[in-house]
Amino acid sequence: MSKLPTLRLDRLLANLGYGSRREVQQLVYADAVTLDGEVIEDADRRIAVTRDLSERMTVDGKPLDPPPGLVLMLHKPLGVTCSHKEAGPLVYSLLPPRWRRRDPALSTIGRLDKETSGLLLMTDDGALLHRIISPRNHVSKRYHVTLDRPLRGDEAEIFASGTLMLDNEDKPLLPVEMETLSETSAYVTLTEGRYHQVRRMFAAVGNHVTVLHRDRMGGLALPEDLAPGEYRVLTEADIAQVLPSSR
């Protein structure tokens, strides 16, 4: 049986953004940290980093922030960006300030552009991030699309053909599933993540996307009660819904 990873308490709390190691030591000296209901008096005590640590440890009377391995779902609103290269507020500004100081840092799993809303995953687990975005794993993403003009009627066939070429690219898109909802709206489900792919697909068939919202990744759906700007920490069962079953 492999041993659980352990960290010195001051290092653990510093990595979670509670302050410098010196500031964390002051918290410990002030009897502000408890584990299983007992005050921890030694900042250099080694702590087993388990998934249930937030349920067992408190800092200043509040549950410990989720330990490393954090995965969360954010309902990204319009107008915020995932990239530091884009203008405007970042998605990280929607999280508690302390979470922006975590080490390892939280990163988005893929991106949604500034004018796209919906389901965005974030994690500090680099291995999981790469599993989800890897083209080999074919994680599907579903978007609700609202269009400027009525559908022609042949879009679903064109998108599913696997032959559609986007401007300035030399490789056709993989097949994309489309479900028509009305004459100006549809669901599209794709497994690639090319730059502005959904918008460029509809531009290629003579239409313009006016509203774009991602509501599903793999088998994980954006909950109806998760408002724009809100987030939720995911369980292992949630995460398992994102990745396709092993083949």
Image (cartoon, grey):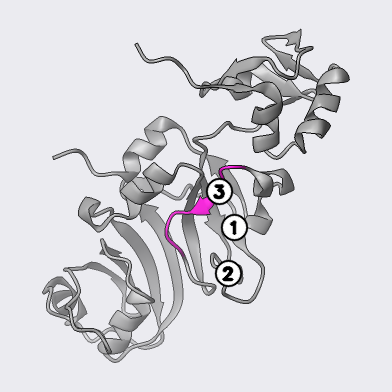
Query: What amino acid is found at the position of numbered circle 2 in the picture?
Result: Leu
Image quarter hosting the N terminus: top left
Give the overall secondary structure of the magenta segment.
Answer: loop
Badges 3 and 1: C-beta atoms under 8 Å apart?
Answer: no
Q: Please give the range of residues in magenta.
A: 103-111
- 63 to the left or right of 80: right
Question: Which residue is painted at 76% across and 14% down in the image?
Answer: 42
232 relative to 110, above or below: above
Residue 114: which quarter of the image? bottom right
Look at mark 3 in the image and give the residue it sits on: 106
Look at mark 1 in the image and give the residue it sits on: 228
- 27 to the left or right of 219: right
Ranked by sequence position, the earlier of labels 3 and 1 is 3
Position in image of residue 52 (x %, y %): 54, 21
Q: Looking at the image, can residue 185 be seen?
A: no
Look at mark 2 in the image and give the residue it sits on: 78
Residue 213: which quarter of the image? bottom left
Mark 1–mark 2 Cα distance, whole angstroms, equals 8 Å
